[in-house]
Amino acid sequence: MDFRLSEQQQEYQTAARALARTEFAPHAAAYDRTHAFPRRNFDLLAQHGYLGMTLPERYGGRDADYLSYTLCVEAFSEACATTGVIFEVHNSLHSEAVYNHGTDEQRQRFLPPLCRGERLGAYALTEPNAGSDAAAIATTAARVEGGWRLNGRKVFITNGGEADEYLVYASSDPDRGSRGITCFIVAKGTPGLSFGPPLEKLGIRASATTDVILEDVFVPDDRVLGTVHEGYKIALQTLHGGRIGIAAQAVGILQASLDHAARAVLAQDSSGQKPADRQLVQRHLAEIATELDAARLLLYRAAWLHAQGIRATKEISMAKLFASRVAMDGTLRAAELLGGRGYESGSLPERLWRDAKITEIYEGTSEVQRLVVARAVLGEYQ
Ligand SMILES: Cc1cc2nc3c(=O)[nH]c(=O)nc-3n(C[C@H](O)[C@H](O)[C@H](O)COP(=O)(O)OP(=O)(O)OC[C@H]3O[C@@H](n4cnc5c(N)ncnc54)[C@H](O)[C@@H]3O)c2cc1C
């Protein structure tokens, strides 16, 4: 077993960290404070070739392997968790789904502008009564001449209002439940499509999260992604890459937290002492560092399996479940190590702690990941 990154993976990691540290980290606190969507960061990701990076070059991608992409999500999230999720949703949840399920005509039409950053993508599955139980969606798609007419409301949509293209999942045959859901590529500006105001959130505050409202939205047949009535499979398959991305976001956040805490406790206080000299402080750092490494190993294994095309539903859920839990726990401990300074609004430990929480919720809550893992484990014994 070889735990080293390949030369190419190291190059991606080094370049992504350099961009993140020089361009994203210095502005992260301001985005958190103002909640302004970081369009500048998205443009920089495009200029540096990170958008659609796992896609083939003929569509504007870079043919990068999934672990290289994972290292980039981690590096960007370490500097700015908001930028991490915007990047992750655009790449994993939108562009990769279009590539994996689109016709060649759709790939040629939609992917190059997504890779160039001319179009931003979103993924719209969740509804007021369909979150963990995504099959319960009530948005409808009625067959009409030349296409479909969509009605319904999606909630909590990342990049909402900012994105140009939305993968909207709607019930095309309500009698068939999850076997009657179709995925549509809906463009911003389509008559009947509108957005709620951005949600005020605990963390990742500058990633626009809005309702997406569909009122008699006409979508032509050439904007149906994949097979009619088989959209639910697309939604779930797409979450495989997505959950790897969120685990990477959690690892990046925890790395930033450990870096900050370790440096802070090494600094002398006014009496000339260093908190790092206290063994109980060292204990926390040792535990955070160990959990961070364990999360990273689970993450890289999941990304590697995914890259090989090996079914890794259990391993991906394990990585997300564990990485998000230790990110939550570790960022809290890291903030506590700084005493009152870690509780101050706008301080880095406080922001990282707030940003960590969402990794336990979106793209399947931790309870949902536990159900996925338990199902797989029980299946191994039946
Ligand atoms: C900031 C943010 C961004 C988001 N971005 C997107 C996006 O881009 N696109 C999108 O489609 N969605 C998005 N979501 C939605 C997100 O994926 C859902 O919030 C999440 O899946 C949980 O669904 P819910 O909020 O309806 O909670 P519910 O499903 O109602 O769950 C409530 C609680 O019940 C628990 N629970 C539910 N079912 C079970 C069960 N069977 N067993 C045990 N416990 C259970 C859950 O773990 C949770 O604790 C986003 C959410 C947020 C907050």
Image (spheres, grey):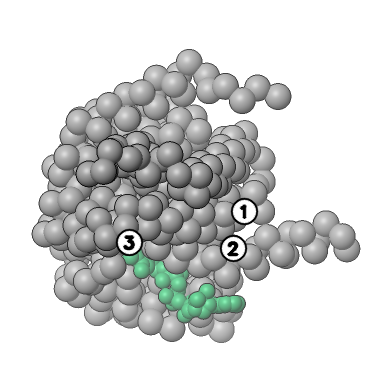
Considering every residue shown, the one lying at the far top of the view is 7
The residue lying at 46 percent from left, 23 percent from top is 9
Tell me the residue that label 1 is attached to: 318
Which of 358 and 103 lies nearest the eye of the viewer?
358
Nearer to us of marks 3 and 2 is: 3
Image location (x, y in percent) of residue 367: 57, 70
Q: Is residue 73 above or below residue 341?
A: above
Q: To which quarter of the image does residue 209 belong?
A: bottom left
The residue carrying mark 2 has its beta carbon less than 8 Å from ligand 1:
no
Image location (x, y in percent) of residue 335: 35, 55
Q: Is 9 positioned to the left or the right of 309 in the image?
A: left
Instruction: Classify the position of the N terminus by image quarter.
Output: top right
Q: How many marks?
A: 3
The residue carrying mark 3 has its beta carbon less than 8 Å from ligand 1:
no
Which of 368 and 130 lies nearest the eye of the viewer?
368
Q: Secondary structure at mark 2?
A: helix
The residue lying at 80 percent from left, 64 percent from top is 378
**Residues at circles 2 and 1 in contact by the CB criterion of under 8 Å:** yes
**Residues at circles 3 and 2 in contact by the CB criterion of under 8 Å:** no
Residue at mark 1 to residue at mark 3: CA–CA distance: 22 Å
Q: Amino acid at mark 3?
A: Arg
The residue lying at 51 percent from left, 54 percent from top is 326
Q: Secondary structure at mark 3?
A: helix
Q: Which label belongs to residue 354?
A: 3
Image location (x, y in percent) of residue 365: 50, 67
Q: To which quarter of the image does residue 201 belong?
A: bottom left
Residue at mark 3 to residue at mark 2: CA–CA distance: 21 Å
- Pick whichever of labels 3 and 2 is earlier in the sequence: 3
- Pick whichever of labels 1 and 3 is earlier in the sequence: 1
Which of 228 and 278 lies nearest the eye of the viewer?
278
Q: Which label belongs to residue 369?
A: 2
Considering every residue shown, the one lying at the far right of the view is 382
